[in-house]
Image: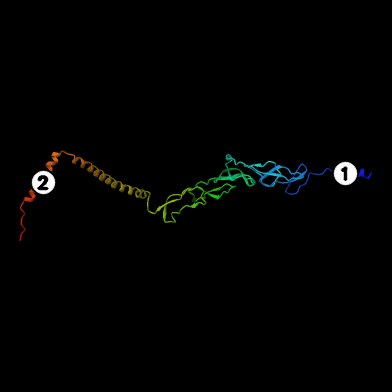
Amino acid sequence: MLWIFVVFLITQLPHSEAVKCYPGEYETNGECCPMCSAGTRVVKHCRENSSTTCMPCVDDTYTEHPNGLTECMRCKLCDAGARLIIKEKCSYTKNTMCGCAPGDFCRHIAGLDCEMCRPCTICLPGSMVKEPGTEFRDNVCEVCPDGTFSATKMSRACQPWTKCEEEGMTELKAGTATSNAVCVQKGLSVKAIALIIVLPVLLVLPVAGVVVFLWRRKKRKSELTPAQETGDPSKRQAERTLLQTSENGTENMPTQEQCQ
């Protein structure tokens, strides 16, 4: 009777839970097998008299942690359509890390990985960078306050307009959000300024004309000389005879004695 009672109690006990394996092991078919290391996968599960058989992952696959997987994980592809670039290449023990190109920031983050990038905002002239962007944050721009300007993109600060009166000058043109004020010396009118600009031009033009005239005249002379040398040969002979006679006559003339 006692034996029958014991059997009855055993049959009434709840079914045991799944096998609990130690760290570094995985469960398969009710048995605990040693895990394969990172960068490898299971080829053959362990048996009573043999351990787990593992194999390294092949190209474009990985396992990041010790595991009981029979297939390695596929490496992630960085989608160019989402403006993603490869930040860290995939290895046998680590998945691909995607990031953004310079001038972009990550708009959608998944853990430490980026899923989509977008171009950073450009702070145009007339504004300044209030908060510089980061890898995961866009630039924040701010319009230049009244009385200041920025003439270039991505200015770190707006510069104050020059105060002409304080500099002892007169304001010719007021400052804008993208340009500084233009100052001139006191007493100079707009006509005087125009004259200062035009006068040098008026002085240069006559000099240039004289230079061109002399150059053309010299060129014309150089073109005439060869033509003279190619004239009538008999005429050139007569000229040489006349020249020689003139020289001989000069030598035969009596010289006048000087006074004692």
State the residue at coordinates (90%, 45%): 6
Tag 1: residue type?
A: Ile
Q: Position of residue 160 (x, y in %)?
A: 49, 53
- Marks 2 and 1 sit apart, C-alpha to C-alpha, by 157 Å
Q: Secondary structure at mark 2?
A: helix
Question: For the N terminus, which image quadrant?
Answer: top right
Tag 2: residue type?
A: Gln
Q: Is residue 97 something that shows in the picture?
A: no
State the residue at coordinates (11%, 43%): 241
State the residue at coordinates (31%, 48%): 204
The quadrant in which residue 257 appears is: bottom left
Which residue is at the front of the view, 157 or 106?
A: 106
Of all residues shown, which one is farthest toward the right? 1
Side of 255 where 125 appears, left or right: right
Q: Secondary structure at mark 1?
A: helix
Q: Position of residue 165 (x, y in %)?
A: 43, 55
Of all residues shown, which one is farthest toward the front? 49
Which residue is at the front of the view, 21 or 110?
A: 21
* Label number found at residue 10: 1
State the residue at coordinates (18%, 41%): 229
* Label number found at residue 244: 2
Q: Position of residue 246 (x, y in %)?
A: 9, 47
Q: Earlier in the sequence, mark 2 or mark 1?
A: 1
The crowding category of the residue bearing disc 1, from other C-alpha atoms within 10 Å (few below 14, some 14 to 19, many at least 20), is few
Q: Is residue 248 something that shows in the picture?
A: yes
